[in-house]
Image (spheres, grey):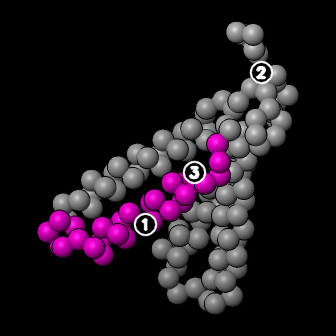
Amino acid sequence: MAIPVNLALAFPFWVYARFPQLPGALSTSILVVWVVAFVLNYALAARRLHDLGRSAWWLLVLYVLPLAVPLIIYNLLSPSWRDTLFGWVSVATFVIVLGGLVVLGFVAGNAGPNRYGADPKGRMALDVFD
């Protein structure tokens, strides 16, 4: 489910880049599709973080960091520092977000229940040292 949702999130940007003079109705419908895909992606990622025993607040790293950091650098720094740091910070932000996506996609969830509910796979946690 995550791949189709992420493709739906990227689709409006591709359409706007290819066809900048879209009619208003088509432009609005693409925006609606993007908002629905964003909500689905957020819900899916929140459930996945809860499966890992983490709070959904960690999604701020994936959603806000890529937008906020470049804007802060661009608006607060002088042009000489901006040109130097913008590329490096963008690469660091990309690595952090990519790491978050790898964790969401490949790390196994907690075995047994956690504070967010039961294990969706029905596994039980083993108490080895009891």
Compare residues 67 and 111 and report the one nearer the observer: 111
Q: Secondary structure at mark 3?
A: helix
Q: Residue furthest front?
A: 130
Q: Secondary structure at mark 1?
A: helix
Q: Residue 106, can we see it? A: yes
Q: Secondary structure at mark 2?
A: loop
Relative horizontal placement of residue 77, taking residue 103 as reference (left or right) = left
Residue pointed to by mark 2 = 125
Amino acid type, residue under disc 3 in the picture: Trp
Residue pointed to by mark 3 = 58
User: How far is the residue under mark 3 from the one under mark 1?
Assistant: 15 Å
Compare residues 87 and 49 and report the one nearer the observer: 49
Labels 3 and 1 touching (C-beta < 8 A): no
Q: Residue furthest left?
A: 80
Residue at image x 70%, y 79%? Answer: 29
Residue 89 falls in image quadrant? bottom left
Q: Position of residue 13 (x, y in %)?
A: 53, 70
Q: Position of residue 4 (x, y in %)?
A: 68, 53
Q: Which numbered tag is attached to residue 68?
A: 1
Q: Residue 5, can we see it? A: no
What range of the chain is rendered magenta? 54-82
